[in-house]
Image: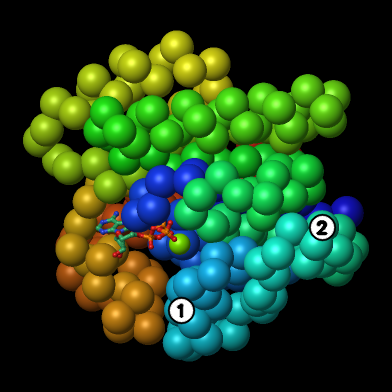
């Protein structure tokens, strides 16, 4: 059975789609049999995947019914099912948490975003209560601005959140912001900024993959 790894957070713009697309691309590059499920009404990740040179399997499923039907089916055909969650803590997010093995919460290191991460964690806890402990959960800091103290403060306030915080921090870089418009991922772009982001994504995805297989 494939493992279902979902990026969720009701907060828009925290990098769910960016991380999901990069993770799917990374898995394919690492020779895994992976598919992305686009659960967001804006369909940005499925449109993005179509624009990439590598053909990465993708399925659009947006209602809770579609998600509950399609995720288990895909889990019989693929090794990893990467779910790009919608903004908002909707019925669709609840459906994703019923089927996920690992829920990963990207979180920007600011006060409002830390709050919304704790709302997402509450929802995960409710799912864990029903599912005898599943899904596993982790938070990582996304879009952190280099040289600010927000990151350190966020790490301190997340310590009490009761969910592991991944070691890798993904920093805010123009190279990452450019990827969607260029029909690319950071591995396709030239320059040292893209290479630094590529290295961060490598480390983050190793952590996520390890955690999903435990
Ligand atoms: N590390 C980064 N550096 C710079 N820009 C980033 C980074 N990660 C994401 N972005 C940009 O931030 C914006 C939001 O990212 P993304 O669409 O992945 O978030 P999302 O959580 O999927 O949002 P939504 O909830 O609206 O679907 C995009 O414009 C994206 O290019
Ligand atoms: Mg999105």
Residue 180 placement (x, y as % from top left): 35, 75
Q: Secondary structure at mark 1?
A: helix
Q: Quadrant of ligand 1?
A: bottom left
At 30% from the left edge and 83% from the top edge, which residue is drawn? 182
Query: Mark 2 vs ligand 2: CB under 8 Å?
Result: no
Quadrant where the image shows the N terminus: bottom right
Which mark lies nearer to you, 2 or 1?
2
Q: Is residue 111 above or below residue 84?
A: above
Q: Secondary structure at mark 2?
A: helix
Quadrant in which the C terminus appears? top right
- Cα gap from disc 2 to disc 1, whole angstroms: 24 Å
Q: Which mark is residue 68?
A: 2
Indicate left or right for 165 with 194 as reference: right
Where on the picture, by quarter, is residue 113?
A: top left
Residue positioned 39% across, 20% down in the render: 158
Residue extending farthest to the front is: 91
The dot on residue 48 is: 1
Dot 1, crowdedness within 10 Å: few (<14), some or many (≥20)? Answer: some
Residue situated furthest left in the rendering: 147
As drawn, the residue found furthest toward the top would be 160
Task: Decide which of 69, 73 is in the foreground and name it.
Answer: 69
What is the total number of numbered labels drawn onto the structure image? 2
Q: Residues within 10 Å of mark 2 (few under 14, many from 20)?
A: some
Observer-nearest of 29 and 137 = 137
Tell whether 58 sits left or right of 29. right
Residue beneath the point at 30% across and 80% down? 181
In the foreground, 142 or 8: 8
Which residue is drawn at the image coordinates 63% and 58% (left, top)?
Answer: 83
Considering only order in the chain, which callout, 1 or 2, is on the residue closer to the N terminus?
1
């Amino acid at each position: 059975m494939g493992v279902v790894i979902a990026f969720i957070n009701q907060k828009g713009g925290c990098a769910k789609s960016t991380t999901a697309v990069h993770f799917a691309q990374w898995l394919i590059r690492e020779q895994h049999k992976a598919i992305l499920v686009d659960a967001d009404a804006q369909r940005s990740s499925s449109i993005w995947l179509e624009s990439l040179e590598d053909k990465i399997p993708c399925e659009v499923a947006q209602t809770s019914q579609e998600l509950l039907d399609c995720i288990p089916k895909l889990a019989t055909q693929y090794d990893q099912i990467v779910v790009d969650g919608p903004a908002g803590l909707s019925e669709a997010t609840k459906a994703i948490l019923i089927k996920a093995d690992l829920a990963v919460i990207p979180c920007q290191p600011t006060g409002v975003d830390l709050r919304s991460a704790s709302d997402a964690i509450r929802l995960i806890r409710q799912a864990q209560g029903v599912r005898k402990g599943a899904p596993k959960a982790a938070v990582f800091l996304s879009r952190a601005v280099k040289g600010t103290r927000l990151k350190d403060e966020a790490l301190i306030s997340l310590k009490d959140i009761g969910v592991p915080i991944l070691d890798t921090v993904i920093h805010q870089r123009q190279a990452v912001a450019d990827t969607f418009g260029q029909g690319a991922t950071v591995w396709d772009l030239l320059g040292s900024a893209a290479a630094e982001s590529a290295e961060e994504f490598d480390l983050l995805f190793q952590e996520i993959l390890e955690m999903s297989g435990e």
